[in-house]
Image: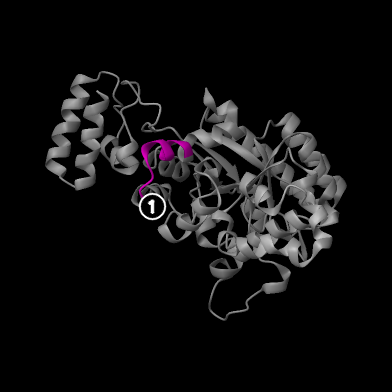
Amino acid sequence: MKNASYALMETVKMGDADQTLGQVQRLKATCACASPRRGFLGGLLALGAGAVLPGCGTSPNAVSLRERIDTHHHLFSPAYLAELAKVNQAPPIVRNWSVARTLDDMDKAGVATSILSVTTPQVGFADAANAARIARESNEWVARLGQDNPGRFGAFAMLPMQTTDGALRELAYALDVLKADGIGLLTSYGDKWLGHAAFAPVMDELNRRKAVLYTHPTDAACCLNLLPNVPNTVVEYGTDTTRTITDIVFSGTAARCPDLRFIFSHAGGTLPFLTERLIKVPVLNPALAARVPRGVLFELKRFYYDTAWSAHAMALGSLTKLVDVSQILFGSDFPYRTGEDNVKGLIDYGFSAADLHAIGRGNALRLLPRWAA
């Protein structure tokens, strides 16, 4: 059956619709456990040559019709949307988000589980008291969503970073009570990046817990609207991710927190292109060498990077020169992109079936083993 499945996928790649449909019918007839759900052929098309039919002698190097783990998938609870609307930060794409739409996107892309996170501005628009309230309401809503949809949703919990005490209180509640998969922070808060001393207590607590820290870029205070008519997302998001990685490394945070598992969005932003410059920093400034005792490259290679907005040859070509495939995670950035966009980009890049499985599921399971069941 495995060989027949691979043959089917080669036909899908060639685009012979009639032949594909015939093979699908034959495979379904010979495999009683083949998925009967709507969109069977669409799922195969989305998965590409690495896909096989679930439960029919599935190869360990293949991803089944609904097995991916999406580590970069956004949500907006009704209460959070209402808060965004009050400050005029709820554009149509955000207002139109729904659980039904997110599940539909996941099914089309073969995603079993999405680890949900709130994107920028998170609660940066609120004072400390309201930020703590809004973050708690959102984190609890996501936890209930996971309970109502078993196996489909995890969470990177949001923290109110206005105060250290508030952030640590929500961190403990999210991980101990709500059982979140990790914490989701922005790359910067005002004029401070994540290596800043103000955030050290949060980083140290995450390290103590051997926790996962997912990060998402935002609009840094330094660099708003620098290019008229060009959204900050185009240039500044990738740049802010690189700034925070650089700050985490050269502040000594990465070396001080060896058990903290970092995930950086969008293939690390501009980091892969600038890696040589980062490696040279301790050479040019020997005073910084003590802060990276294992070397800059060691820290960069141990971080995880997702494929959101990066599933194309320009980004992947550079990222895969910096890190092993074992450090790359599937990320869709829904609702700003679709899961299918990302799947197609990864397949078009030419990853092997084993690499597609690692990116789509295996690497995430090392970080989040509870989703193995």
Three-letter residue code for mark 1: Gly
Q: Which residue is mark 1?
A: 345
Residue 228 spot, x, y in % from top left: 57, 81
Residue 37 spot, x, y in % from top left: 31, 30
Task: Look at the magenta stretch and give its main secondary structure.
Answer: helix
The residue located at (76%, 65%) in the rendering is 190
**In the image: residue 31, left or right of residue 95:** left
**In the image: residue 7, left or right of residue 153:** left
The residue located at (72%, 54%) in the rendering is 123
- Based on the displayed image, in which of its 4 quarters is residue 126 positioned? bottom right
Residue 286 spot, x, y in % from top left: 81, 62
Residue 238 spot, x, y in % from top left: 58, 63
Does dot 1 land on a helix, a strand or a loop?
Answer: helix
The residue located at (53%, 68%) in the rendering is 234
For the residue pair 109 and 85, the one nearer the viewer reads as: 109
**In the image: residue 316, left or right of residue 224:** left
- Based on the displayed image, in which of its 4 quarters is residue 266 positioned? bottom right
Query: Relative to 320, does residue 113 appear above or below in the rendering?
Result: above
Query: Relative to 250, does residue 56 appear above or below in the rendering?
Result: above
For the residue pair 5 and 271, the one nearer the viewer reads as: 271
Q: Can residue 164 be seen from the camera position used here?
A: yes
Indicate the quadrant containing the N terminus: top left, top right, bottom left or bottom right. top left
The residue located at (70%, 59%) in the rendering is 246
Q: Which residues are magenta?
A: 349-358
Q: Can residue 218 be seen from the camera position used here?
A: no
Residues packed near mark 1 inside 10 Å, few (<14), some (14 to 19) or many (20 plus):
some
- Based on the displayed image, in which of its 4 quarters is residue 188 positioned? bottom right
- Asked whether 98 falls inside the magenta stretch, the response is no
For the residue pair 116 and 22, the one nearer the viewer reads as: 22
